[in-house]
């Protein structure tokens, strides 16, 4: 592999970056061996530039090597480029690197965590004379497996969200102190990040299930977000907000992303789909198309949350829900890069995420997150529809007395809807079952057509309630729900007319 050339000067740091470097380096100088430090800075704030400057100062002062750990090849290449620009002779350790002869030539190594772990298992002296380990995306717990190979070495973790991906392994167990950088709002105010405007579209998430990892499952996401009604809501949101500007769409599953691709393609929008099954060549070609297409749309499955930088992105669409504060910030951060002609970007939220975590630029006490992560990993948001969807209409006692000949069994629309979906039936099945229930209750308690119509009128509120429940289950618009309620009442009235006409003649 051809080694990178060395430039004489590193890029100039912004004032807040210079301040962060000074604070971090001062702390590193005071740390005893095996003591570790964590640094937080929002996505787009230039963490790579900051820790590359830290690496440069460390090498110059102590004459020992710096190891930088990452978990994606794109991040490794980006880091190598910045280190080279800073004048640091470095080597990227990828899967092709089996040995490291003549290590004295290098001042720094950038390693993919899985690759380095394999090499260290074979030879625990695979990299030599490491004085400082820098961990990019330190919230990812995959790095911990190799820390024991580096004794009497300081570790500097860097992340936008100091919240461990594993609630059983909080970051305060690895890092003794957190240094908090500039906030999102301050970076926006100073012109270093774009202002994000959030557009929220209500989505009923009651069908989503939570897996063992504490996150909504991909399977329940696919079931909800591949529905035609959700695809229509996505197109509607894009048309209202995106204005034919470069757009990233984040999905939870491949089926959803492919459905999004087909939906947009059928309407003539310039769109590509990308997921983890793509070959390196296809991935590069897709990203190159996106960079070169001014109004391009790229739908993906969260693989672009890190290691991807396209400053021209002006729309971020969260076509999913997440319980991960880290993922929430990573996704939105892809649109926050500033350009001379770009000072704002749009956030389209189709997963009620801004309710769960507050707006992206909302101030967060990261020291509190670091010290008490369990408070931010537990479910802090309850879907506002849960109560209404889980309970039947509360019928007034005087009306209930008119239906004493009927079963008192509750008709829970949400339960009927989920059962229909599991059996592969259409949501319209719930409407038919509800119509049958109302027809039977009227028939069992009315002596003639006149009384049947009277009971029909008394059930009016319950009919509207059920159709409102169903509308929330399928994420229908208010206009569609109103139409459904009117159609429902008309069908039930006609059936009563037909029944009593046949039985009273």
Image (spheres, grey):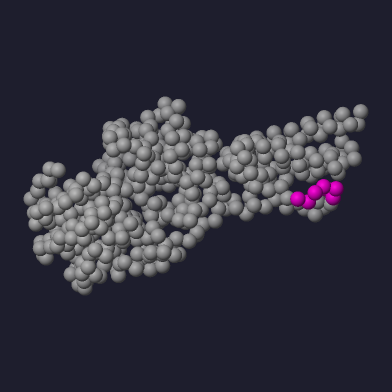
Q: Is residue 120 above or below residue 283?
A: below
What quarter of the picture does the N terminus occupy? top left
- Residue drawn at 45 percent across, 64 percent down: 375
Camera sees residue 93: yes
What quarter of the picture does the C terminus occupy? top right
Camera sees residue 241: no
- Residue drawn at 31 percent across, 52 percent down: 43
Q: Position of residue 438 (x, y in %)?
A: 77, 41
Q: Is residue 239 above or below residue 104?
A: above
Q: Position of residue 323 (x, y in %)?
A: 46, 54
Q: Nearer the viewer, residue 68 or 485?
A: 68
Q: Position of residue 105 (x, y in %)?
A: 8, 54
Q: Is residue 4 above or below residue 492?
A: below
Which portion, as a residue range, is magenta? 403-409
- Residue drawn at 79 percent across, 39 percent down: 439
Looking at the magenta stretch, what is its main secondary structure? Answer: loop
Q: Nearer the viewer, residue 123 or 109?
A: 123
Instruction: State yes or no: residue 215 in magenta.
Output: no
- The answer to which image quadrant residue 364 occupies is bottom left
Instruction: State yes or no: residue 405 in magenta.
Output: yes
- The answer to which image quadrant residue 57 occupies is bottom left
Q: Is residue 323 left or right of residue 487?
A: left
Q: Is residue 480 left or right of residue 11?
A: right
Q: Nearer the viewer, residue 341 or 2?
A: 2
- The answer to which image quadrant residue 426 occupies is top right
Q: Is residue 182 left or right of residue 368?
A: left
Q: Position of residue 29 (x, y in %)?
A: 18, 70
């Amino acid at each position: 592999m051809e080694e990178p050339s060395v430039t004489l000067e590193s890029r100039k740091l912004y004032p807040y970056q210079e301040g962060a470097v000074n604070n971090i380096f001062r702390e590193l100088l005071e740390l005893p061996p095996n003591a570790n430090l964590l640094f937080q800075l929002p996505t787009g704030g230039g963490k790579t530039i900051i820790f590359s400057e830290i690496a440069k100062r460390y090498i110059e002062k102590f004459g020992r090597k710096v190891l930088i750990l990452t978990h994606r090849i794109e991040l490794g290449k980006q880091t190598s480029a910045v280190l080279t620009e800073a004048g640091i002779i470095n080597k990227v350790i990828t899967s092709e690197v089996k040995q490291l002869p003549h290590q004295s030539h290098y001042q720094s190594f950038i390693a993919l965590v899985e690759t380095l772990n394999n090499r260290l298992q074979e030879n625990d002296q695979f990299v030599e004379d490491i004085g400082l380990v820098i961990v990019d995306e330190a919230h990812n717990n995959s790095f911990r497996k190799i820390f024991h190979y580096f004794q009497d070495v300081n570790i500097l973790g860097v992340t936008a969200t100091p919240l461990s991906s594993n609630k059983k392994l909080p970051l305060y167990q690895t890092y003794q102190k957190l240094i908090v950088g500039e906030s999102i709002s301050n970076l926006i105010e100073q012109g270093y990040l774009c202002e994000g405007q959030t557009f929220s579209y209500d989505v009923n998430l009651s069908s989503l299930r939570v897996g063992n990892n504490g996150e909504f499952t991909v399977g329940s996401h696919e079931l909800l977000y591949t529905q035609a009604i959700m695809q229509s809501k996505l197109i509607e949101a894009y048309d209202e907000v995106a204005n034919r500007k470069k757009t990233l769409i984040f999905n939870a599953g491949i089926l959803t992303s492919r459905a999004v691709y087909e939906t947009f393609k059928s309407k003539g929008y310039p769109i590509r789909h990308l997921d983890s099954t793509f070959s390196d060549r296809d991935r590069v070609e897709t990203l190159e198309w996106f960079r070169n297409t001014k109004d391009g749309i790229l739908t993906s499955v969260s693989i672009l949350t890190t290691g991807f930088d396209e400053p021209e992105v002006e729309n971020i669409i969260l076509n999913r829900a997440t319980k991960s504060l880290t993922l929430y910030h990573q996704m939105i951060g892809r649109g926050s890069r500033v350009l001379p002609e770009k000072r704002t970007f749009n956030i389209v939220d189709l997963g009620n995420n801004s309710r769960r975590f507050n707006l992206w630029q909302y101030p967060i006490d990261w020291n509190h997150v670091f010290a008490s992560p369990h408070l931010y990993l537990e479910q802090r948001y309850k879907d506002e529809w849960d109560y209404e969807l889980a309970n039947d209409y509360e019928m007034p006692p005087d009306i209930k007395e008119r239906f004493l000949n009927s079963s008192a069994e509750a008709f829970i629309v949400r339960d009927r809807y989920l059962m229909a979906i599991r059996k592969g039936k259409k949501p319209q099945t719930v409407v038919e079952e509800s119509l049958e229930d109302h027809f039977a209750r009227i028939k069992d308690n009315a002596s003639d057509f006149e009384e049947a119509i009277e009971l029909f009128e008394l059930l009016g509120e319950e009919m509207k309630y059920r159709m409102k429940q169903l509308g929330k289950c399928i994420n229908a618009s208010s206009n569609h729900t109103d139409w459904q309620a009117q159609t429902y009442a008309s069908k039930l009235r006609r059936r009563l007319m037909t029944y009593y006409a046949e039985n009273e003649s």
